[in-house]
Image: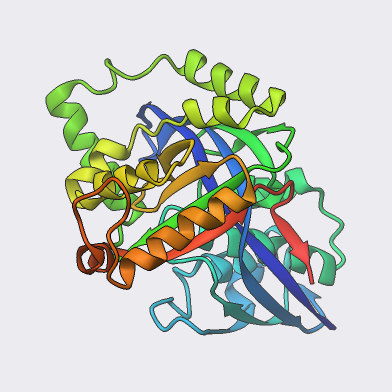
Amino acid sequence: MGDMILQAQAKLNLTLNILGKRTDGYHDIESVVQSIDLFDRIYLKTGLPVPVRRGNEEINIKVTCNDTSIPMGRGNLAVDAACALAEFAGLRASVEINIEKGIPVAAGLGGGSADAAAVLVGLNQLWRLNLSPSELMVVGERLGADIPFCVKGGTGIIRGKGEIVESLPTPCDLWFVVVILQDRISTAQAYAAFDRLAETTGVYDAALNVADVTSRMVQSIRAGKVENIAGCLTNALEQAALSIVPSIAGVKHILLAQGAAGVGMSGSGPTVFAIADSRAKAEAIRAALTWASCGGRPKGTSSGGASVSRVIKEVFVCQAISWGVAYR
């Protein structure tokens, strides 16, 4: 019937607060989230869809990916999204999905959710379903908490388990230095560690005032003031992530020593990011980290390049963008 190429954009959590655990196993959250121009490329090809009663059992999907660590069947959110949309629409069709990974895996950047969102958006058009973004978000929320935001993209506040999305204006000229660590943390790992800490420290009771955290960040975003946005970065999962990957703290220190306006951790980690007040400043910070990984000593630190290279895997300079899925 047709084919399509899409870009599935990564996201950063500028704030993340956890309000409590739900009976369905998810957690109630409130988070200000930002799409960035780091992406996976999704190639879709599909045959003519045929109406059936139980589309999810009869859809034929073939998946390929340049990352061998990605599952090729169920458990891959892109596959799950295609099956869920077929079931929702009551049809079957052959689908080929080729995923070209650019977003690091298990890094708190929403790569799997972004892929699922791109599949929903793409198949909606190829199958001529004419579903609205809100309807696609309903399909997506059954599969993963970040998928509804990734369908819409841009800048927004997510609530509930992630299914409630409120859009915000995207700040102009907002730049990030995104640092991928060698270690990985799964979402399940991070939340399990958070829950263990909550039981022993009462972290839910000691949580930041959610309204204040969110309102300060929203005001800063609406004003477009980079230094204020940088000063409002928070992530309630950071202590849990640090218990798994202690080097997160050291990387944040290195970024601040290079002149970052502020530093944060995205999602369940361990990815750390810095906010810079210009692209030139972001590129300078990346250059300093690259130099350090080749043997130099980052400014303001006692660690040489050998130790930095053992901790840091990749460094990207990214810009805030106002969309979640793009056609290419």
Using the image, determine if residue 304 lies above or below residue 244. below
Q: Residue 87: horizontal and vertical position, in percent?
A: 66, 63
- Number of numbered discs overlaid on the protein picture: 0
Colour scheme employed for the rendering of this structure: rainbow
Q: Residue 127: horizontal and vertical position, in percent?
A: 82, 70
Decide which of 126, 299 is in the foreground and name it: 299
Which residue sits at x=46%, y=31%? 233
Q: Image check: 132 left or right of 27? A: right
Using the image, determine if residue 223 lies above or below residue 311. above
Residue 225 visible in the picture: yes
Which residue sits at x=42%, y=57%? 179
Q: Image check: 84 left or right of 287? A: right
Which residue sits at x=36%, y=33%? 23
Decide which of 117, 88 is in the foreground and name it: 117
Q: Image check: 277 left or right of 232? A: right
Decide which of 251, 216 is in the foreground and name it: 251
Q: Residue 57: horizontal and vertical position, in percent?
A: 58, 73
Residue 141 visible in the picture: no
Decide which of 84, 192 is in the foreground and name it: 192
Q: Hey, which quadrant is residue 326 in on the image?
A: bottom right
Q: Residue 124: horizontal and vertical position, in percent?
A: 79, 63
Quadrant in the picture for the N terminus: bottom right
Q: Hey, which quadrant is residue 119 in on the image?
A: bottom right
Q: Image check: 219 left or right of 134? A: left
Quadrant in the picture for the C terminus: bottom right
